[in-house]
Amino acid sequence: MDAIEIISGEVREAIRSRGIDPRTEPESARRLVSEAIADYDERTLAGRLPVLADPAEALRSIVDEVAGFGPLQRYLDDPEVEEVWLNSPQAVFISRRGISELTTTMLTNGEVDDLIERMLRTSGRRVDLSSPFVDAMLPDGSRLHVVLPDITRAHPAINIRKFIARTRNLGDLVAANSLTGRAAEFLDAAVAAGANIVVSGATQAGKTTMLNALTGSIPARERVVTCEEVFELAVPARDWVAMQVRQPSLEGTGEVTLRQLVKEALRMRPSRIIVGEVREAESFDLLVAMNSGLPGMGSIHANSARSAVTKLCTLPLLAGPNIGSSFVTPTVASSVDLVVHLVLERDGSRRVEEIVAVPGGIEGDVVELETVFTRDAQRRLVRGTGFTHLGDRLAAAGHDVRRLLSAS
């Protein structure tokens, strides 16, 4: 046994004997570790114990082990790291500012199993052979996703998408060069006017970040209800109710789906409803809510704004055999007002690629779109050729659409 293993064992025994919960009492655990290291240093003077080479490193390592998530805690504490994922115990990756890196961290199979158990302990969710997938939230708000073998080939796959509250409003996105001040001013006015907005993009393109920024433009007196698979949105509204789905119990009962959440949200007197991400039949319920005069927002995986609209015309068909394109396509055209599409650039930056308006027209089975902002050949976000149908609503909210969309 080396010095750190000896001290770690003593700390664990002290934690048990004193009844300390390291996760809810991290400062008490840290003091206990400091005391154990100081005591060990004194005992090494007798020459019968291994010398502790670096007390500061030992303190960090043991605190991470007993109060955090072991070798992964350093990445969770690093503000530049956005995501951590494990393909195997010897393949631990991180994403730093949008760029993936293979780390030098090496784990054992037992350490990986222990990490999964500890991460899920506070979430109330489970993962096992009968339910090999899990989405959960860590105590700091980070999102955890786990897949077990034999769904994966040999080892559990773990993804931790960190909760980084850097962006609170559209101004923050302008400062990060994700969009221009003119586009931000237009989106701010559109949200205030009650426009229905869909945010689209690939994985890690910044959809949740954009949704969070858009919620900063919601008028203060509105009641906001959010529906998500796992809590990720941070709405600044005072009158805000957040809901997330629930997995079925071991008996297969008690499951709460995203569709149910959307339906329940409509019974909660919302002024605005936000669905974190639509993937399946819940898109139908979001469209119905938007079509009822209730402003809404949501996100969707797509390659472009046009693809997002096409997907919104097909996903609701999963809601039931009696729902057809003849109903869904006109509903999309009349319900969705704007689509904000984002991309993850090669350098790791996230940027708004285009903002399109959905004026309500249909040609054949295709929903008409108007490009309000788009990227030019120099990758600058510039004014598009389309105008917008939101003039009256923007005017009612005190905004002049012509001034908002005039050339910069």
Image: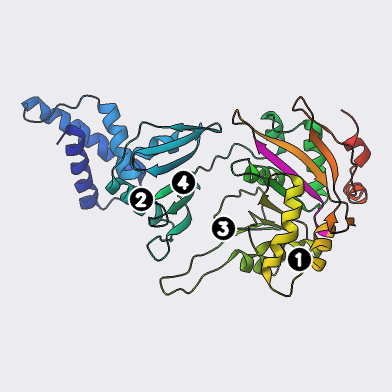
Residue at 61% across, 48% down: 234
Kindly indicate the quadrant of the structure image that contains residue 265.
bottom right
> Could you tell me the amino acid type at mark 3?
Glu
Distance (Cα) linking label 3 and label 2: 27 Å
Q: Which mark is residue 229?
A: 3
Q: Main secondary structure of the magenta part?
A: strand
Going from N to C along the chain, the mark reached first, 1 or 3, is 3
* Residue 57 at least partly seen: yes
Q: Which mark is residue 159?
A: 4
| Above or below, 259 relative to 404 | below
> How would you rate the neighbour count of disc 4 (Cα within 10 Å): few for under 14, some for 14-19, many for 20 or more?
some
Question: Which of pointers 3 and 2 indicates the residue nearer the eye?
Answer: 2
* Residue 268 at least partly seen: no
* Residue 390, image x, y percentages: 89, 49
Kindly indicate the quadrant of the structure image that contains residue 405.
top right
> Could you tell me the amino acid type at mark 1?
Val
Residue at 69% across, 44% down: 303
Number of marks present in the image shown: 4
Q: Is 341 a magenta residue?
A: yes
Question: Callout 1: helix, strand or loop?
Answer: helix
| Above or below, 243 relative to 395 | below
Residue at numbered disc 2: 154
Distance (Cα) linking label 4 and label 2: 16 Å
- Is residue 45 toward the left or the right of residue 311 in the image? left
Range drawn in magenta: 335-344
Question: Which of pointers 3 and 4 indicates the residue nearer the eye?
Answer: 4
| Above or below, 305 relative to 330 | above
> Could you tell me the amino acid type at mark 4?
Asn
